Image (cartoon, grey):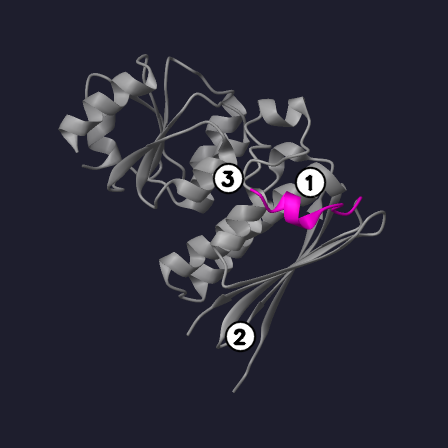
């Protein structure tokens, strides 16, 4: 499933989607950035509630296919702009990480 | 043969929110060189962790990356406080980061272990009150 296809489902909306064509190959959940950095696999969708600038670097360097902001977490406009510039996909959902991953497990 | 490409970066210690810039630039460079994605990921993760450490603990520093035919070498040098007990610092979960750093999602005590995990060679040269130099290598062959 691509990031764009996921963004078009009911549960999610796109915050930034410069590379909607990227494939999602699995899911990683975590808020400790170094932990995510070391454990998330390339092309995973990364579910988090962190909303600071540093999530962009982690997503870019660990090469996740998208960040999914859980529980309605929102980002400052400047962070969204940087994500677009750096080619980082970000989706959001009102659901919590558990509910999101349950939904993803039947979709992926 | 044995051509060496060197990339030099200054890591700004005052701007925590933009930490990771050197690693992201290096990632782009490696992509342009046509390196395999898994190698790029290893370098990116190891270098980012080191870069973040320099920003959190040492007020910044300098990063040099040497690309040879055999390996990619990352050298991170700072003039920070140094690491008192390297063995302890290498343990997963050990961190001296402040609460404000932790609230940003750092300070999980995974930085140095991640660096070791994603590289084939790692050496820490540190003196309390003088600074720290970390050398890492990722083999290409």
Q: Position of residue A44 (x, y in %)?
A: 31, 39
Task: Inspect the magenta stretch and tell me whether residue B82 lies in it.
Answer: yes
- Name, please, the residue furthest toward the bottom: B1
On the picture, is B79 further left or further right than B116? Answer: right
Badge 3 and badge 1 in a common chain: no
Can residue B26 be seen at all in this image of the molecule? yes
First to last magenta residue range: B81-91
Magenta region's main secondary structure? loop
Please tell me whether mark 1 sits on a helix, a strand or a loop.
helix
Q: Secondary structure at mark 2?
A: loop
Relative horizontal placement of residue A69, taking residue A51 as reference (left or right):
left
Q: Position of residue A63 (x, y in %)?
A: 39, 45
The residue tagged 3 is: A57
Q: Chain of mark 3?
A: A
The image quadrant that residue A102 belongs to is top left
Residue B62 vs A60, above or below: the answer is below
Q: Is residue A33 above or below residue B141?
A: above
Q: Dot 3 lies on which element?
A: helix
Res A26 label: none
Q: Total number of numbered labels?
A: 3
């Amino acid at each position: 499933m691509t990031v764009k296809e996921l963004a078009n489902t009911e549960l999610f909306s796109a915050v930034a989607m410069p590379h909607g064509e990227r494939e999602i190959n699995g899911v990683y959940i975590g808020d400790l950035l170094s932990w995510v950095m070391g454990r998330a696999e390339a092309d995973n969708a990364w579910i988090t509630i962190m909303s600071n600038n540093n999530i962009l670097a982690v997503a870019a360097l660990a090469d996740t296919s998208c960040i999914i902001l859980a529980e309605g977490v929102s980002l400052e406009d400047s962070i969204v702009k940087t994500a677009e510039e750096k080619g980082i996909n970000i989706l959001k959902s009102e659901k919590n990480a558990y509910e999101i991953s349950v939904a993803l497990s039947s979709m992926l | 043969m044995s051509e060496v490409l060197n990339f030099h970066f200054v890591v700004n210690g005052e701007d925590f929110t933009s930490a990771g810039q050197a690693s992201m630039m290096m990632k782009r460079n490696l992509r342009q060189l046509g390196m395999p994605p898994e190698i790029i990921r290893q370098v990116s993760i190891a270098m980012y962790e080191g870069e973040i450490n320099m920003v959190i603990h040492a007020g910044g520093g300098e990063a040099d990356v040497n690309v040879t035919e055999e390996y990619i070498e990352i050298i991170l040098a700072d003039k920070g406080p140094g690491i008192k007990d390297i063995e302890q610092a290498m343990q997963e979960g050990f961190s001296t980061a402040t609460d404000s750093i932790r609230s940003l999602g750092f300070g999980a005590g995974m930085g140095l272990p991640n660096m070791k995990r994603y590289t084939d060679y790692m050496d820490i040269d540190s003196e309390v009150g003088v600074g720290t130099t970390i050398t890492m290598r990722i083999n290409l062959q």
